[in-house]
Image: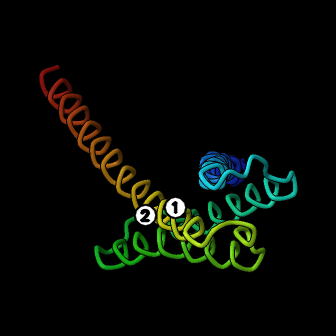
Amino acid sequence: MNKIRKAIRREMDVEFFACTHGVSIIFMYGFVRWLDHVQEISFAMVVGMMILGYVISWFQKLLFIKEGEYTTKEYKKRGFLWSVVPSLLLILTGEFFQWFRENVWWTGILFYGIMIIYFFMVWWFLELFYEKDTEDINILLERFKQKKKIK
């Protein structure tokens, strides 16, 4: 039962980021195209971008699937890959499917630049939030230990 619970939890983590990445890709793509006076995005494009978000999310999850601690060097390397590989996947997918073939030259550059910043910002925010959560949990643990000693 423990393996099923872990698998469901992993999938839920992946689903959360897949939706976040997919919506971010779709929104920014639509926004950049809107700046170029293009008002529509095909349904097939939206589905493809959601699938890309799911693939990216699974890649990111697999980087940190091992339970336990990572060395500082290993953690930094994985953190770097967490942002770089999705950025490359996004660019390769966009170029392969010619997402910007109907747009002026700067739209693709703007989109890719914003999305690269997005991936690095998400990683940075996760770092900040997890660091703060760890601090809070350690404080609560110390309080709990102190209460145990008093009793």
Query: Which numbered dot is residue 115?
Result: 1
Callout 2: SS? loop
Q: Position of residue 40 (x, y in %)?
A: 79, 48
Pick the front one: 85 or 25:
25
Q: Give the amino acid type for the residue marked by disc 2 in the picture.
A: Gly
Q: How many marks?
A: 2
Q: Position of residue 80 (x, y in %)?
A: 40, 73
Q: Is residue 143 left or right of residue 70?
A: left
Q: CA distance from mark 2 to mark 1?
A: 30 Å
Identify the image quadrant of the C terminus: top left
Q: Earlier in the sequence, mark 2 or mark 1?
A: 2
Pick the front one: 74 or 88:
88
Q: Is residue 47 left or right of residue 135?
A: right
Answer whether residue 24 is visible to the viewer in this image.
yes
Q: Residue at x 75, y 46 (%)?
A: 39
Q: Residue at x 34, y 44 (%)?
A: 129
Q: Position of residue 81 (x, y in %)?
A: 47, 75
Q: Is residue 128 left or right of residue 1?
A: left
Pick the front one: 111 or 149:
111
Q: Dot 2: few (<14), some (14–19), or many (≥20) neighbours within 10 Å?
A: few
Query: Which numbered dot is residue 68?
Result: 2
Q: Is residue 47 left or right of residue 105?
A: right
